[in-house]
Image: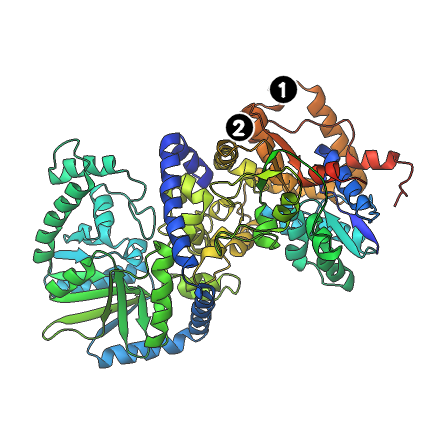
Amino acid sequence: MKVALFVPCYVDQFYPQVAIASLQLLEKLGVRAHFPKQQTCCGQPMANSGCEQDAKPVYHNFVDAFQDYDYVVGPAGSCVYHVRKHFDIIEQTPAVQHVRTNTLELFDFIINVLGITEIPGSFPHKVGLHLSCHGQRGLHQANESEMTPVRDGQLRRLLSGLQGLELTELTRNDECCGFGGTFCVSEAGISARMGQDRVQDHVRNGTQVLTGGDMSCLMHLEGIVRRQKLPVRVLHAAEILNGVIIG
Amino acid sequence: MSHSERSDIFLLDAERTTWHDETLWFVREKRDKAVYATPEFQKLRQLASDIKDHTLSRLDFYLQQFEENARRNGVHVHWAADATEHNAIVLGLLRQHGATRVVKSKSMLTEECHLNPHLLANGIEVIDTDLGERIIQLREEAPSHVVLPAIHLKKEDVGDTFHKYLGTEKGNNDPQQLTETARQHLREKFLAGQVAISGVNFAVAETGTVVVCTNEGNADLGVNLAQVHIACMGMEKLIPRLSDLSVFTRILTRSATGQPITTYTSHFTRPAEGKELHIVIVDNGRTQQLGRPDFRASLKCIRCGACMNTCPVYRRSGGHSYDFTIPGPIGAILSPNIDMRKHASLPFASTLCGSCTDVCPVKIDIHTQLYKWRQVLGEAGKLPASKKWSMRLLSRVLAKPGMYSAGGKVARQALRLLPHGLTHGQGYNPWAIARELPEPPQQSFREWYAQQPQNDKA
């Protein structure tokens, strides 16, 4: 099985530790992932801004970079969702179709391809799980409050399996954090307010470590946590799981 | 002004924003409870969606069938291509009956057509009889929500309004007393109304019936007291059969307010003895939207407002920030069809979180349509120049791995070296209004990876 690590542009530049943790976690789970250095970005920033046509060369670069792999695995639900859903505007060659179908979010890959549903380890902290909308509603990685009162999902299960970890029960389990890609600057006021409200929900309910599967939401929430100097640590779930597992 | 600029005004009052958000979230939670308690709800959504898809695919047929059956029932059917024609038809009917006093029950269509100002300008007294509508009519405001038109107002605001216009005691904010005042005030108007105008929730093609759903019973009182009833409907309100109605009555209020059904679900099939029933069927851009394959499904909307209640942006920006008759996510996909330039910012007033799509009882793919409108607006040159050129530049960089790597390095260096005040200048860095930028690391991941001896340099 040939697996490529897809490292979204902002993770590459600002959160290398998240990509390192993803790489190491996969390795501990028996998968040696490669990082094809031709990769840059999934093109979502342009497309979400209404400039899908400008994103086409970026889409082609993405497909070129990853077409020779069986799976493309990334620690960001939103970017993965973009590749799977919105790469429909370029010619659907076998390579494009292959890449779209086999680009998977990290935990989706771990659970559904590797078949690993429990990672042993201990993390004795109160952990607040932030659900990425694109991971949850787009990739169906977690139940949605619009459909059912049952709070369940891939990351929730993996994290709950860790010894000593207590999950924060949020007042609003799956409200959007307000990052929204370029929305965070084009609608900065609303974006900030949404993020502040999300952080407050965590603080009010006792979160010590705020985590999730999508670094873009976490970048925004971390920015608020740091601005407000709150006693909350923000970590990608790959960092937690890679940190506790004995390799 | 863009949606974002109007939102910033709303956000200035942080406390009111919190209250608005929590009030609408409460309605969303009531919706959730009703949905969870209905095991077949997802099946009902699919069924409702299928019925609407089918109806839209044969809309010409069902419109003619409806007209034929309504005429057979003794109903007068009028066709209006746009708002101007609609308003002229209604005014013409009023003139024909020598009417100067009209009572109106809630109708988003007449709001869309700006009927009230047209009638007022022509010497007709129009009274909105829905409580929320009446409040905003007194204040000369537009509705801020399709189901809860005065949801942007607190009881104190209503108290002030009633004090000013209906003579209640200053500072009396007791909801029950205010409601009673409105009842007494409206009762006089009902009795004096010569013509009653109502909206339409559903129009049944096989029977020629229009169905009006209200909680206050104001449509029924108005219609039964007046000599003439004019029902105004958008042409997308059709459903084929009476049996289809049961699907929609089950999902409409569960989605809207969490009620099992509206208090009143009134069927108007034929005029009472000696009275008249008119139905005005309005296009006003709907045919154009029907002709847009990517956006056709927006016409399935039954105006429940669930997408507004769930939308984290709407809850924090208020309905007026959309500056369109139908606010919220659904308004953001309907409005560019009417005026692309004016409403160009609305499809961007979303994080594309998808919650709107998931609560929509007729399964409109709202967030996908928001994304697609953005592309249409981009293609049509309706984006701000700064956005257009920055995105073009960004794509040049991101299409070339070497340029991206070098650019990233420079940017990180700059972030590290420049003083905080410069990188976080609020006047030019909107991120910094409430957030710290990430702390730039020494090495990017790709730099780190290249240094690991065990890694092949793929």
Residue situated in front as seen by the camera: A141 or B276: A141
Q: Is residue B49 above or below residue B7?
A: below
Left or right: B52, with A152 as reference point: left
Name the image quarter holding residue B400: top right
Look at the picture and state if B149 lies above or below B290.
above
Question: Is the residue under label 1 in contact with that under label 2 (CB below 8 Å)?
Answer: no
Q: Is residue A183 above or below residue B411?
A: below
Q: Quadrant of the N terminus of chain A?
A: bottom right
In the image, is B309 to the left or to the right of A80? left
Q: Chain of mark 2?
A: B
Foreground of the two, B131 or B68: B131
> Residue B454: horizontal and vertical position, in percent?
91, 39
Q: Nearer the viewer, residue B446 or B123?
A: B446
Is residue A53 at least partly visible in the picture? yes
Q: Position of residue B408 (x, y in %)?
A: 74, 33
Chain containing the residue with disc 1: B
Label 2 SS: loop
Q: Residue at x 78, y 60 (%)?
A: A95
Q: CA distance from mark 2 to mark 1?
A: 14 Å
Q: Quadrant of residue B280?
A: bottom left
Which mark, residue B434? 2
Mark 1 is surrounded, within 10 Å at the Cα level, by few (under 14), some (14 to 19) or many (20 or more) other residues, namely few
Task: Label 1: state its secondary structure.
Answer: helix
Question: The disc labelled 1 sits on which kind of residue?
Answer: His
Residue A234 x %, y %: 63, 32
Q: Which residue is mark 1?
A: B420
